[in-house]
Amino acid sequence: MTISLPAEQTSFLSRLVSAGRFASPEEAVTEAVRRLEADEAVGYLNPAPLTTAEAALVYAPDPKWERMERAVAGRARPEV
């Protein structure tokens, strides 16, 4: 796989290698992808379950929307 990076990121990778943090730019990119993968695994792809308090808040009745639903109930016409 060949990847092109902007000059700023290429320069950043060169500085990391020069500072001895990584043996090569490829090693630095591999580490960056590993960290991104780890972040994604615990992020939006696998969100933490809602707590009881959060669930109660999310699923609590909303009086404003309840009134609106009652006001428009039966007004919709089926598509033909």
Image (spheres, helix red, strand yellow):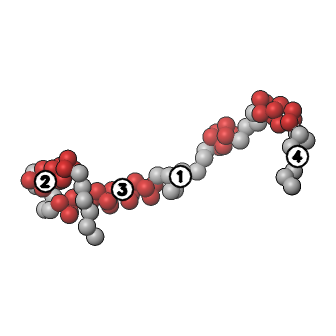
Count residues near mark 1 (Cα–Cα under 10 Å), then give few for <14, some for 14-19, many for 20+.
few
Residue 23 location, x and y as percent?
13, 62
Q: Amino acid at mark 3?
A: Leu
Figure check: 24 above or below 66: below
Q: Earlier in the sequence, mark 2 or mark 3?
A: 2
Residue 32 location, x and y as percent?
28, 56
Figure check: 16 above or below 25: above
In this view of the protein, can residue 68 be seen by the observer?
yes
Residue 28 location, x and y as percent?
21, 58
Q: Which residue is mark 1?
A: 47
Q: Residue at x 18, y 53 (%)?
A: 10
Look at the numbered disc 1 and give the secondary structure of its residue: loop
For the residues labelled 1 and 3, the Cα–Cα distance comes to 16 Å
Residue 1 location, x and y as percent?
28, 70
- Quadrant assignment, res 75: top right
What mark, if any, has residue 77 been given in the picture? 4
Labels 2, 3: front one? 2
Position of residue 64 in the picture relative to residue 1 (left or right) = right
Pick the residue in front: 1 or 77.
77
What mark, if any, has residue 36 been given in the picture? 3
For the residues labelled 4 and 3, the Cα–Cα distance comes to 48 Å
Labels 1, 3: front one? 3
Q: Which residue is mark 2?
A: 14
Q: Are marks 1 and 4 in contact (CB under 8 Å)?
A: no
For the residues labelled 2 and 3, the Cα–Cα distance comes to 20 Å
Q: Earlier in the sequence, mark 4 or mark 2?
A: 2
For the residues labelled 4 and 2, the Cα–Cα distance comes to 64 Å
